[in-house]
Image (cartoon, helix red, strand yellow):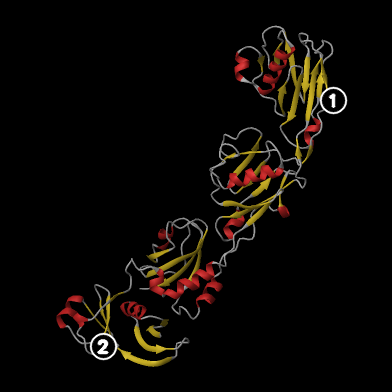
Amino acid sequence: MLYKMTKAPVSRIVNSTALVATYLSAGYTFDGICDANGVLTLAEDLDVRKDLAANWALLNPVLALGEPGLETDTRILKMGDGITAWNSLSGLLVGQDATQDFTTLLGATFADEMGAVVGVAVKAQATIVSDTNPVNVAATGKLTTDASVPVDQSTVTIGETVYKFVAGAPAAEGDVKIEATVADTLTNLKNAIAADADSKTAGKHFCVVAHPLVTAAASATVLTVTAKLRGALGNAYALAASTDPASHFTVSAATMGTGAGCTLGVNHTVIAGAKTYTFVGDTPNAEGEVLAGATAADALDNFKSAVNGEVATKGTKHFCTANATIEATTNTNTTQLLVARTAGALANTYPVSGTAPALTVLGGRAYLSGGYNVSAAQIINAVAGVILEKAEVYAVASGASVVGLTAGLLYKFMVLTYGTTYGSALGGTGTGTSIMALTASANLHLLIVPIM
C-alpha cells in the first residue's frame, strides 16, 4: 500500500506505515492512500495525534480503526483498532533510531533490488603476456684447462668482467688466487664469480661484487658459466682467456651459446597497482621478489602466487604479501590475468606494465581497464516501483562534500560503490553537515534518503 505525505511545497509517496510516522514527526501531513503516480485513491483528512509518552499513558485513549498515534519523545508509533486502549496497544519504534539499518527503513525488497543493481558493477582487468615462445633456455659457456695451473697475471674474461690470476694474496677487485692444483684454482674462480664472502675472507679471491650476468659451476678441469637471464640474450656474452701470460684455459666459443626462447628472466619486473614484482634467479628473500624458474610458464605461476600472497610458496617461489588492490586469476603458459579486487571505475587508474619484450600488457594498455560503476540511472530504474520514497544518488570524491544536503536534516545513506572500503559498514545515519565524516576518505557513490 502507498501513502501520500505533504509538507508544502513537497509531496512524497511512501510504502510503509513506519515511513508515514517518520514524515509525520518531520511536520508532513498525511493526505491518504494513493497509486504509484501520487493520485489519491482514498483521501484522509487526518490530524495525526502526537504527544509525549507520559500524556498518552495518562489519557490512555482508544484510537479509531487505522488511526495512528505517535509518542514524540520515544518515537513509538501505535495504530488504533477502535477497541483497545492506548496503554494496551503494541508499538513500533520508528524514525531516527540509529539501530535501524537501511533495509529496515526502506523495506526488505529494497535490499534484493539493490543487490541486483550493485552486481552490475564490473571489475577492471589486464592481461600480462610473456614472450610467445614458452621455451626458456639460458645460454652457457665453458672454460676448459689443459691440466696446468694459470700463470701469474693471466686472465679470463666473461662478458665485460675480467678475472686475474695472482700468485700472491688477492688485493684488487677481480683477483683470483692460484692454488697448487687446477681443481682448487677453478674453485677459487667459481667463488670469485659468486663473490662468496667466506672464501674472500680466506684470501682465495678479492671479489666484492658478484658477476651481474652469469653463475658458475666447477669440476676438476672445467668451469661452466650459465646466463642468469634466460633466453637468447645470453648468447652475446663474451668469453676469452689470455695466452700471454698463459691462463691454460680454452673457451668453448668467443661468446656463450645455446640460449633460446622466451627472454623472461632475472631482473625483469611487473608493476601491478602500487606494487613492483622483480624476477630473481635465486631463492627470493625480499618483498616483491619472484623466482624466475626454468620456463616462462614457471615464472608466471610463481608471479600468480606472489600477487595473491600465497603462504605455502612464500620463501621458495616468491617473497610477497598479497597485493592489496589486484588479484591474479586465470593463467596459461604465456599469459596471466590480473583483476581488480573491487568492482568499479576507480581501478581503471591502477597501473600495469612489464619489462618489454619479455613481458607486455595485452593491447598495450598502461592501466587496468573495463572497470564500471553502477550509475545513478540504473539505481533509480532498479528501485522504481519498489521504493517510491525520495532518493538521490551522489558521487562523492575523497575529501569532498555531499552537495545538496540540508544542514540539520537527518539522512539515511547507503554506499553503492566505493574506491576504498567504507569502514566496516555500507550505510549509516547522519545530518547534512556530518555525512562526509561518516563516510571517511573514499571515492563513493551514495544513495541518500532524507528521513527527518
Depth check: 393 or 116 in front? 116
Whole-percent x, y for residue 350 in the image: 60, 52
Q: Is residue 311 above or below residue 122?
A: above
With 177 as the anchor, is 56 left or right in this view?
left
Mark 1 burial class by Cα count in 10 Å: few <14, some 14-19, many 20+: some
- The quarter in which the N terminus is drawn is bottom left
Q: Which residue appears farthest toward the left when viewing the image?
A: 58
Q: Residue at x 78, y 9 (%)?
A: 151
Give the amino acid type for the residue marked by disc 1 in the picture. Ala
Whole-percent x, y for residue 32 in the image: 37, 89
Q: Based on the displayed image, in which of its 4 quarters is residue 10 positioned?
A: bottom left
The tag earlier along the polypeptide, 1 or 2, is 2
Q: Which residue appears farthest toward the front when viewing the image?
A: 220
Mark 2 burial class by Cα count in 10 Å: few <14, some 14-19, many 20+: some
Whole-percent x, y for residue 45 in the image: 32, 91
Depth check: 193 or 140 in front? 140
Instruction: Give the distance between the C-alpha atoms of the residues marked 1 and 2, in whole angstroms.
Output: 104 Å
Give the amino acid type for the residue marked by disc 2 in the picture. Asp
With 237 as the anchor, is 338 left or right in this view?
left
Of the numbered discs in the image, which one, if any, rests on residue 254? 1
Q: Based on the displayed image, in which of its 4 quarters is residue 348 positioned?
A: bottom right
Residue labelled with disc 2? 81
Of the numbered discs in the image, which one, if any, rests on residue 272? none
Depth check: 203 or 226 in front? 226
